[in-house]
Image (cartoon, rainbow, N blue to C red):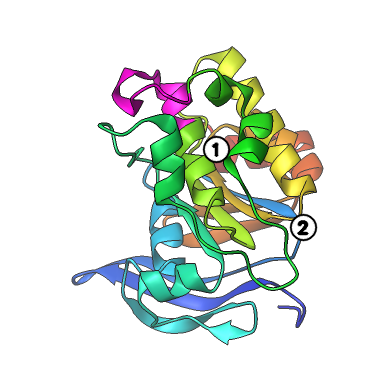
Amino acid sequence: MTGDALLAVSDLTAAYGEAEVLFGLSLELHAGEAVAVIGRNGAGKTSTLKRIMGLLPARAGTVRFAGHDITRLAPYRIARLGLGYVPEERRIFTDLTVYENLEVGRRAPQAGRSAWTPERLFALFPNLAAMQGRRASAMSGGEQQMLTIARTLMGNPRAILLDEPSEGLAPVIVEQMAAAINDMKQSGVAVLLCEQNLQFATAICERAYIIERGEIRYCGTTAELAADAGLREQYLTV
């Protein structure tokens, strides 16, 4: 682990009741970068994000974010420190419009950081700009996913955790999602991305971790991973 990491997870062990799901897991995310956690279904990707966000109890290890030990903080306190979370389930308010969903997520930016506004987000997600007054229940799955990310950005996070953002989306929407996340990264938001889609992760992330049965099996660049057919066959092929 390096001392300048924005998010540093060290030797983390976590469980659902008596069933352990993470075993000595360590990873880090630096300001302004995007990192992927890649693995098969059931490998521990979602559990990793839930543990970081305080939604799953820790048995051992530490999680530090922006200089704070957040290992045992409540999720709302972690969010207030500037860590956003977009779960795999699109937990939007279906009875509210796009604009109203964004307003629900509004929080003041931290000192010295520019605020995310609806106008700025409509530039990032043009699909949403055309449906500001539409109820979220009348949106497609891809549009709802964009809205979920946009609403999280309204909280002005320093980093964001994304759980399977490309899952179940049409290829054209996946391309738009990748472009938007790259723009978001260029704006200074660090991204920790859990994915099964290696092509999508490679289009966004510089580094990757492979997780298998709750343990990190690989840490390196996405380019090296994409070039190693044996590694992909061992850990990513279904």
Q: Is residue 13 visible?
A: yes
**Toward which corner of the image does residue 95 lie, by quadrant?**
top left
- Vertical placement of 34 versus 140: above or below? below
Residue 143 rendering spot, x and y as whole percentages: 47, 24
Residue marked by disc 2 = 32
State the extent of the magenta-drawn residues as a range: 132-145
Instruction: Please tell me which residue is depicted at 34% across the width and 39% down the height of the picture.
Output: 92
Q: Nearer the viewer, residue 234 or 146?
A: 146
Secondary structure of the residue carrying numbered label 2: loop
Q: Are marks 1 and 2 in contact (CB under 8 Å)?
A: no
Using residue 230 as the reference point, say whether residue 186 is left or right of it: right
Secondary structure of the residue carrying numbered label 1: loop
Distance from Cα at disc 1 to Cα at disc 2: 27 Å
Residue marked by disc 1 = 236
Q: Give yes or no for residue 143 being in the magenta stretch.
A: yes
Q: Give yes or no for residue 11 being in the magenta stretch.
A: no
Mark 1 or 2, closer to the camera: 2
